[in-house]
Amino acid sequence: MDVPKPGIIVPTDAVVKVLKTTICGTDLHILKGDVPAVTKGSILGHEGVGIIEEVGNAVNNLKKGDHVLISCITSCGKCEYCKKQMYSHCEDGGWILGHLIDGTQAGYVRIPHADNSLYLIPEGANEEALVMLSDILLTGHEIGVLYGAVKPGDTIAIVGAGPIGMSVLLTAQFYSPNL
Ligand SMILES: [Zn+2]
Ligand SMILES: [Zn+2]
């Protein structure tokens, strides 16, 4: 559907033109009604790559035209949790895209705390592959492999072979399990 193009609300925001995005299992939970904080009509999506369309005047590290990777986690970089690198607990961020504010499954998305929540993409990088770094590959690694405490010689079972399961398959191999 047509919605108004997002703009800068606070000076640390950036607006990104979305080039690539994804559908996450989290979005399916939302559609099933498991995340009541998401209100009807919200734009879903928390992953993507794009081009900076506009920056607020307190954004220092990014400018219009930069290609960026959007983190699924927004972080202020200054609160107690951010200082401990627990960005998903950020007091003014965490998982808010496609949850508490409009997300990335749109032509444009507003990203709060842009300096900490967007990552500059080097020229010539494969942006279609990079979109996996917004969430999926890292979630497979952290939740599947690190929480599963995979170590050399382990035999591992992956239940479900969607993108997360395949990311587990890829990243588990850093830990030399039996294949
Ligand atoms: Zn996701
Ligand atoms: Zn923070």
Image: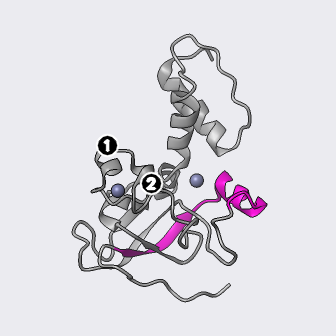
**Residue reaching furthest to the top:** 153
Q: Residues within 10 Å of mark 1 (few under 14, many from 20)?
A: few
- Is residue 72 toward the left or the right of residue 32 in the image? left
Locate residue 167, reporting x and y percent: 58, 38
* Vertical position of residue 73 compared to residue 39: above or below: above
* Number of the label disc, if any, that sits on residue 127: none
The mark that comes first in sequence, 2 or 1, is 1
Q: Quadrant of residue 20?
A: bottom right
- Is residue 162 toward the left or the right of residue 178 in the image? right
* Residue at 30% over, 73% down: 12
**Residue carrying label 2:** 126
Residue 162 is covered by the magenta coloring:
no
The kind of residue tagged 2 is Asn
Quarter of the image with the C terminus in it: top right
Locate residue 78, reporting x and y percent: 27, 57
Q: Which residues are magenta?
A: 13-35
The kind of residue tagged 1 is Lys
Residue 24 is covered by the magenta coloring:
yes
Q: How many marks?
A: 2
